[in-house]
Image (tube, helix red, strand yellow):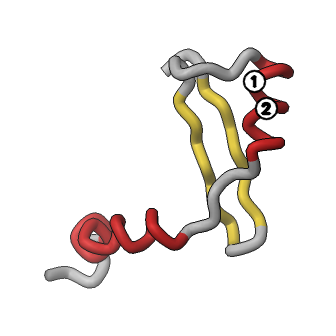
């Protein structure tokens, strides 16, 4: 396996990552639902820049 093939390196770790990563606060979800009418039709880009800083971008048109 090529060490630069991140999909191969990380695909088997996805379940562990999902179990232990911090969840979004309900207050954030409520705010987005009210302010931009966030609903199940949105895709969300969660760009993790570090363990403490994330950018969350709602993308309704994808």
Place of residue 53 in the rendered image (x, y in percent of width and height, measured from the top left):
77, 65
Distance in Å between CA atoms under marks 1 and 2: 5 Å
Query: SS of the residue at dot 2?
Result: helix
39 left or right, relative to 26 = left
46 left or right, relative to 4 = right
55 left or right, relative to 60 = right
Residue 36 figure quarter: top right
Place of residue 61 in the rendered image (x, y in percent of width and height, measured from the top left):
55, 16
Above or below, 10 against 32 in this view is below
Place of residue 8 in the rendered image (x, y in percent of width and height, measured from the top left):
22, 70
Discs 1, 2 touching: Cβ within 8 Å = yes
Residue 22 figure quarter: bottom right
Query: Looking at the image, which residue is at 68% across and 38% down?
Result: 57
Query: SS of the residue at dot 1?
Result: helix
Residue 33 - label: 1
Above or below, 43 against 19 in this view is above
Would you name the residue on which mark 2 appears? Answer: 30
Query: Looking at the image, which residue is at 53% across and 30% down?
Result: 43
Place of residue 29 in the rendered image (x, y in percent of width and height, measured from the top left):
73, 37
Q: Which of 24 and 6 lies nearest the eye of the viewer?
A: 24
Query: Looking at the image, which residue is at 38% across and 73% down?
Result: 16
- Are there few (<14), some (14-19), or many (20+) residues within 10 Å of tag 1? few
Q: Which of 24 and 12 lies nearest the eye of the viewer?
A: 24
Q: Which of 42 and 15 lies nearest the eye of the viewer?
A: 15
Query: Looking at the image, which residue is at 14% across and 81% down?
Result: 1
């Amino acid at each position: 396996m090529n060490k630069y093939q991140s999909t191969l390196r990380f695909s088997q770790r996805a379940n562990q990552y999902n179990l232990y990563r911090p969840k979004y606060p309900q207050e954030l979800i409520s705010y987005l639902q009210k302010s931009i009418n966030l609903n199940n039709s949105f895709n969300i880009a969660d760009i993790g820049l570090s363990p403490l800083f994330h950018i969350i971008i709602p993308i309704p048109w994808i």
